[in-house]
Every structure is written in C-alpha cells, then in structure tokens.
Image (spheres, grey):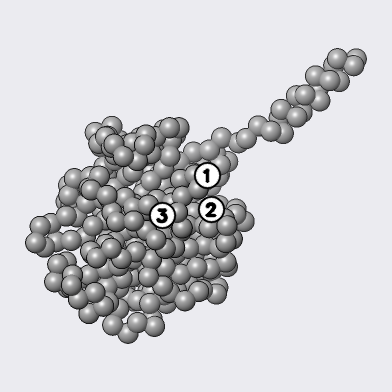
Amino acid sequence: MKHILSALILLGIFSCHQQEPEVYLFSFFQDNGQDGLHLATSTDGLYWKALNNNQSFLTPTVGDDKLMRDPCIIQGHDQTFHMVWTVSWNERGIGYASSTDLIHWSEQKYIPVMHHEPKARNCWAPELFYDEVADHYIICWATTIPGRFPNTDSLGDDGYNHRIYFTTTKDFVAFSETKLLYDQGFNVIDATIQKNEDAYIMFLKDETLSPKPEKNIRIAFSDELTKNWSLPSTPLTPNWVEGPTAIRTNDNWIVYFDMYTNHKMGAIQSSDLQEWTNISDSIHFPEGARHGTIFTVKKSILDNIIAQKSKH
C-alpha cells in the first residue's frame, strides 16, 4: 500500500508540472487591411494554415480610413491578448483592442500617439513588447515628421522619412510621453523587438530609396530596452521586403518578412544572429497573407477557436 501511495503522489506531482503544449499563431492582414484581422496557425513554424476559412476575426472600426494593417498581438502577463495596428496610411494614431480568447474582442480604441506633433504624417506598423523589469508594455511605431531629420528628407518615397518612436503603458488607458526610440541617420520602419538573454535585439527595415534602394531587413542590438541601440547590421534579406516578425525555435531564430513585390512571405534562419540562411522555399503561408506578428498560445486557445468557429 505504501508503494502504491508513493507512486500516486509522484504521478500527481508529475501531472502538476506537465505544461500544456503550445502552438504558433500568426496575426496578419490581407489586401489593404480593410476587412481586418486574420489568423493562421503552425506547429513547426514552416507550414501555416489559415483559421476561420481565412475570414476576418475582427473588422476595423476606428480611424478615418478604418484599416487594420500590421496587426501585432502579444499575450500579457495577465493572460489577456493585446493588439495594436495601423489604422490608416496618413493618421497620427494607432488602433488597440484586447481579448481573452482571440474571438471576442473589446471595443476598439484609437490611441493618439503622435497628436502632439501637428506635422506628423503617419503612424505605421505599431509593435508591442512587454518589459518584465518595468512591468509595463512598450508600443513602438514608425512616423515621418517633415523637417525633423533634414539630411534624409529627400531619400525616401514621396517625402517619407521615418524614425521609430515609442510610448509605454501599464493598462492601455494611460500612456507615457512619446519619445524617440531609434535614429541612426537613415529612414527606418517596421521595428520589432525581442529579448535575447539579458539583452535586446531589434529587427527593422531600412526604408532608404535613394541614391540606392535598400528596402531590406537588418538587426540592431542594445543592453537597454529604450536607448543605446546600435547601428544596424548589413542586410539580412534581399531588397524589397518588409514587416519582419521573429520567433526562436529550439536553437534557431526565424525571421519572417513580406516579399511584397512578389506577393508572398519569406523567411531567414540563424543559430547565432550572425550567419543567416534563406529558407523562403521551405515555408508555406495562406494565399494573400500580408505581414503581421507570430506569437505562441496554449493549444487550448487554438482548440477553442477551431471549435467556436466551426459552429458558424
């Protein structure tokens, strides 16, 4: 009897420590983002299948243009999913909504992150990062303010000359003062931040058009989340790509990007963040997928999405 009880106790301890398996989800948009949020899933990070028959999970309602481009989702420490997105090509704010299951969403909110800058032309590709040390969220995005960085005002498309800005929040109600996050003397958009041990990495797009087009993904490093970012690396990708999103799988980093002139997704892989291999021929995404963010969820979240959406 003693041996049976011991075995049962050990089995109980083992069961308590078993972790629920996780799967990858990809939040993305199609066309110009007018129909809203799309989701896809993968177990290996290579083959991605659209959920909900590739129909929208959430239709945009905020902003003048009512778009939902570049949707970025992370799951917070409170287990709530938080999403930000680009509401327009030419507005000074971004969109926000939250959900506990990725099916039912809060009322959408317009966050006027650049309304204090009357000349700001836009707010593109907002991204979320949870700062465990400060216990708050960082939102970063790209904005052009004509005349702010005159040395590169003529080197982009149609007068666009972006830098990366950020704000912080604990509750998505109150926000800190907007500040400059990344300026290394060139036109930059699509920044996304990952933690790497005790340091931080930023994948970004060099948006330079003249005198020689760049339009490629690079990487920068910092020991501090909101300052002292390095100069960018040499290009990691071919030119004419955008919208990087990164995950770490086993011992490898995978960075996905939108090959927008070829109308398909691409990816590169590295074990050391130095040497990169193009694995674009090894991935499959839903037809028409544009860029967004890849994140992990418990399998029960995915199972519930499939179950709920199969009823409709």
Local crowd size for mark 1, using a 10 Å CA cut-off: few (<14), some (14–19), many (≥20) = some
Which one is nearer the viewer's eye here, 253 or 262?
253
Local crowd size for mark 3, using a 10 Å CA cut-off: few (<14), some (14–19), many (≥20) = some
Label 3–label 2 contact, CB within 8 A: no
Q: CA distance from mark 3 to mark 1?
A: 27 Å
Q: Residue at x 54, y 65 (%)?
A: 106
Question: Mark 1: which amino acid?
Answer: Val
Q: Residue at x 32, y 85 (%)?
A: 118
Vertical placement of 38 versus 269: above or below?
Answer: below
Whichever of callouts 2 and 1 sits on the residue coming sooner in the sequence is 2
Vertical placement of 21 versus 184: above or below?
Answer: above
Label 2–label 1 contact, CB within 8 A: yes
Q: Residue at x 81, y 22 (%)?
A: 8
Left or right, 17 with respect to 7, comes to left
Disc number placed over residue 297 in the picture, else none: 1
Whichever of callouts 3 and 1 sits on the residue coming sooner in the sequence is 3
Location of mark 2 (residue): 75
Location of mark 3 (residue): 222
Q: CA distance from mark 2 to mark 1?
A: 8 Å
Q: State which quarter of the image contains the N terminus.
A: top right
